[in-house]
Image (cartoon, rainbow, N blue to C red):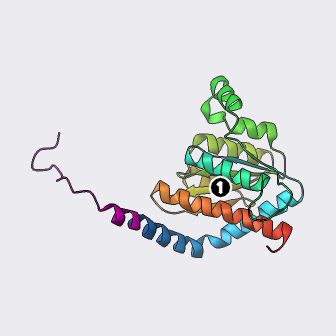
């Protein structure tokens, strides 16, 4: 228990407006930096994604928590539409089938909830979009292993130093790393990167808006 000598003094809460502004300023600074360092990697990943979808391959996406929500958002933009009318594109979020997820977790382990689906659904030439803000999510890592074994391309969206996922990527894979310590900031750039992938795909496959 802290003694009176080493106990940190309680600080008054930050003014709510100042707090909100600090989030905007931090996000703007990170996105400005990422625009310089990450844009070429996102463009290359978008080109690979467009090439795969253009030849009739499909996209599988996986992640946990907020990243699971991003997977579902991303798949919906491809299957439905992003900002222009075009045919639906084949994309599946591996986070949405509660029966499959719970059966696999129960019968095997939670580490297998995505890899088992990749083994069942993935084919050579397909693309796995793998999200983890730490780069160390075991179930996402196992999905990457399954995808690589099937000759799939992996697009990994990570944060911090990229974690174990960074070391697993092969020459045909793509790493979109947001080198920042805060999960919320990483997720904010991840969703922007996913929107950029959608727009790149639409631009390549369906021309100008």
- As drawn, the residue found furthest toward the right would be 55
Place of residue 133 in the rendered image (x, y in percent of width and height, measured from the top left) = 54, 52
Picture residue at 71% right of the left edge, 57% below the top: 170
- Viewed as shown, does residue 91 lie left or right of 178? right
Instruction: Label the magenta part by its dominant secondary structure.
Output: loop
- Viewed as shown, does residue 189 lie left or right of 5? right
Picture residue at 59% right of the left edge, 49% below the top: 67
Picture residue at 29% right of the left edge, 60% below the top: 14
Taking the magenta stretch, the answer to whether it contains residue 9 is yes
Taking the magenta stretch, the answer to whether it contains residue 5 is yes
User: Against 67, is 1 above or below?
Assistant: above
Magenta range is: 1-21
Give the class, few, some or many, for how many residues have Cα within 10 Å of label 1's Cα (few <14, many ≥20). Answer: many
Q: Is residue 47 visible?
A: no
Q: Quadrant of residue 189?
A: bottom right
Place of residue 73 in the rendered image (x, y in percent of width and height, measured from the top left) = 67, 51
What element does badge 1 sit on? strand
**Image quadrant where one finds the N terminus:** top left
Q: Is residue 7 visible?
A: yes
Q: Nearer the viewer, residue 62 or 119?
A: 62
- As drawn, the residue found furthest toward the top would be 107
User: Against 121, is 11 above or below?
Assistant: below
Q: Nearer the viewer, residue 197 or 149?
A: 197
- Viewed as shown, does residue 110 lie left or right of 46? left
Place of residue 185 in the rendered image (x, y in percent of width and height, measured from the top left) = 49, 60
Q: Name the residue carrying label 1.
A: 156
User: Against 143, is 82 above or below?
Assistant: below
Place of residue 30 in the rendered image (x, y in percent of width and height, measured from the top left) = 50, 69
**Image quadrant where one finds the C terminus:** bottom right
Q: Nearer the viewer, residue 146 or 30?
A: 30
């Amino acid at each position: 228990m802290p003694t009176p000598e080493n106990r940190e003094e309680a600080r008054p809460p930050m003014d709510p407006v100042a707090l909100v502004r600090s989030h905007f300023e931090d996000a703007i600074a990170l996105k400005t930096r990422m625009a310089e360092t990450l844009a070429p990697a996102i463009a290359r990943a978008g080109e690979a994604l467009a090439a795969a979808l253009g030849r009739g391959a499909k996209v599988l996406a996986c992640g946990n928590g907020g990243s699971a929500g991003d997977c579902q958002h991303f798949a919906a933009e491809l299957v439905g539409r992003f900002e222009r009318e075009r045919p639906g594109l084949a994309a599946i979020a591996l986070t949405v089938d509660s029966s499959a997820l719970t059966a696999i977790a129960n019968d095997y382990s939670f580490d297998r909830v995505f890899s088992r689906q990749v083994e069942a659904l993935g084919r050579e030439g397909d693309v796995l979009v793998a999200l983890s803000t730490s780069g160390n999510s075991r179930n996402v890592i196992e999905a990457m292993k399954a995808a690589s074994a099937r000759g799939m391309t992996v697009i990994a969206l990570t944060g911090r130093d990229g974690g174990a996922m960074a070391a697993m990527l092969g020459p045909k894979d793509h790493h979109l790393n947001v080198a920042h310590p805060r999960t919320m900031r990483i997720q904010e750039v991840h969703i922007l990167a996913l929107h950029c992938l959608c727009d790149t795909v639409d631009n390549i496959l369906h021309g100008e808006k």
